Amino acid sequence: MTEARIRIEDLNVWYGSRQALSAISAEIPDRGITAIIGPSGCGKTTLLRSLNRLLEEIDNPRVSGRVSLDGVDIYAPEVDVTDIRARIGLLAPKPFPLPMSIYDNVAYGPRIHRQWRTNQLDPIVERYLKAAGLWEEVRDRLRAPAKTLSTGQQQRLCLARALAVNPEVLLCDEPTSALDPISAQRIERQLLTLKQDMTIVVVTHLLRQAHRLADYVIFLWLGELAEAGPADQVFHEPRDPRTKAYLSGDIG
């Protein structure tokens, strides 16, 4: 395994009296794609959103333990949460383009975070639309409303928007679940390209997708870490009997 970019140490998450994650400890390698797998309700999305503190925006849970990005605990009191969320971006399950043009969706983050001048934004918008595999389809209608795009195109636009603030880590929460097979394939292709230069963490309920994408796998079972390791090892030589049963379809 390559050097870890994110380290999770004894992470616990409670929603009220219900414990969603219990004593999770794992490492997410630098670059490549880490897939978080497991049955519905096992804590996959909770774990993903704990990695950039987005949990706090939703349910105000209680969190204990440590999540470190490059050795810095992101839950430390002195940490700037806005900075963490800029460094660790998120692609949601369903596309939610901002109510503005295609161009302005991509330019929104750089404007907010870096205060670029207007004449400097054109190459940035082009760069990230290309990175998301959308440039050729929209280059002649950049000022059109984002809502005029198809669902698959909107998801790639949201990917471009997430990339435009130049995150170091990209979290993807079932990023193809709302897409048709062709659009899903395009998103997967872009993630496989992007993994050469950044750390990507993908929650997926599709084992075939995990097989296609993952370099490293984290398997959760009822809020606990059942197994984590290189994809080849987890998929072909699982050590935990729950992993073997889940992969064979006997449970979950």
Image (cartoon, rainbow, N blue to C red):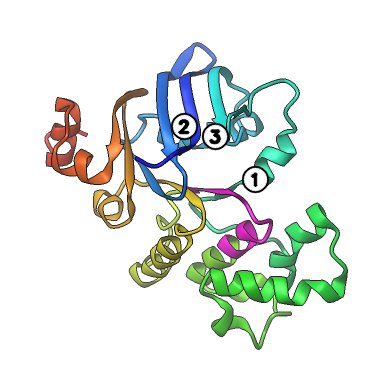
The disc label shown at residue 51, or none:
3
Between the C-alphas of marks 2 and 3, the distance is 7 Å
**Along the polypeptide, which appears first: circle 1 or circle 2?**
2
Between the C-alphas of marks 1 and 2, the distance is 17 Å
Instruction: Answer few, some or many: residues within 10 Å of disc 2's Cα (few below 14, many 20 plus, some between 14 and 19).
Output: many
Q: Is residue 223 shown to the viewer in this render?
A: yes
Which residue is label 1 attached to? Answer: 87
* Vertical relation: 183 (above or below) 213: below
Between 223 and 33, the one nearer to me in the picture: 33
* Vertical relation: 146 (above or below) 43: below
Residue 162, horizontal then vertical, whole percent: 62, 56
Query: Could you tell me if the residues under marks 2 and 3 are in contact, i.e. CB atoms within 8 Å?
Result: yes
As shown in the figure, which amino acid type bears the numbered disc 2? Leu
* 216 relative position to 13: left or right: left
167 magenta-colored: yes
The C terminus sits in image quarter: top left
